Image (cartoon, helix red, strand yellow):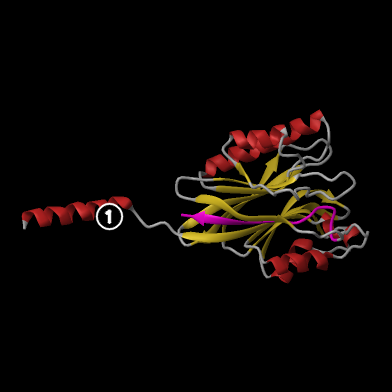
Amino acid sequence: MKRLLLLLICFSALSFYKGKPQRTIDLKIMSYNIRHGKGLDTVLDLSRAAELIKNQAPDLCGLQEIDQLTTRSDNVNQTQYLAEHTQMEGTFGKFMSFQNGEYGMATLSAKPITSTKILKLPDGLQEPRAAIVHEVDIAIDCTIIFANVHFDWIESSEGSASRLQQAKTLVAYINSLDKAAIITGDFNCTPDSPTMQYFADQGFVFVEKGADHLSFQGEDASEIDHLIYRNSEQVKFKTKQSQLLKAPIISDHRPLVVTLEVRY
């Protein structure tokens, strides 16, 4: 009887220290530089990007090149328009004042956002830059960092140095939050660049796109739109699916859509 009681006590202790069982969910993420709605056919039509995003139904979406009440975009609040048409929560991050309005980036979220930081980054060589950093509840008892970036676009050694400094500022802030993190957006650099090497050195994993990897479909096609992630002790990501959609008219960039398996 004493031996049975001892075994029960040991089993209870082991169960206690084992902690809660792991749970798994899928998280669908999209990144898209929409070129303020102006397609390669030179037509300004934001509804095309809105419809594409709505059809994909991502949980989180990072958008770059967003106008806010500017003359060139018919004075439309593009973040509000896209949020309403996709039935998601929209957040605008300003880079600079532009044509009687503002120019920057935006995120859309179908998950509850618990905090938002429009993080000022070191200025680019020709334009200011910021990142949108959210803490997002992707499930009960599971909060992650979701960051949207659009780094300096200048193609030179000075531009490369600028992007690297922007990346370092972003990572320093993400480190202070101490959570699993996803960064997506238009990095304006290829996977073998110093900036992307820095992210790798900081423990970030690159989501592979496969053979069809050229995300910029302008005059010089290149792979500059990315999704990277870093695990924490509590939350682990794993790539389930990754694809660059074929959308040859809507923008000079292709939408990147990634589904991650999340264990927490």
- Outermost residue, top direction? 157
Q: Is residue 38 left or right of residue 55?
A: right
Question: Which image quarter holds the N terminus?
Answer: bottom left
Residue 182 can be seen, yes or no: yes
Residue carrying label 1: 15
Q: Residue 236: give x, y in percent of width and height.
A: 50, 50
Q: Residue furthest front?
A: 211
Q: Is residue 83 visible?
A: no
Q: Is residue 254 magenta?
A: yes
SS at circle 1: helix
Q: Amino acid at mark 1?
A: Ser
Q: Nearer the viewer, residue 88 or 261?
A: 261
Point out the residue furthest to the left here: 1
What residue is shown at x 93% (from left), y 60% (from top)?
41
161 is within the stretch colored magenta: no
Residue 153 sits in quarter: top right
Classify mark 1: residues with Cα within 10 Å, few (<14), some (14-19) or many (20+): few
Position of residue 147 measured from the top left corner of the image (x, y, whole percent): 64, 49
Q: From what the image shows, is residue 136 above or below residue 127?
A: below
Q: Between residues 210 and 48, which one lies in front from this camera angle?
A: 210
Q: For the point 88% across and 59% down, which residue is it?
A: 39
At which x and y percent is residue 9? 17, 54
Count of picture labels? 1
Q: What range is drawn magenta here?
A: 250-264
- Quadrant of residue 222 within the rendered picture: top right
Residues 42 and 28: in front is 28
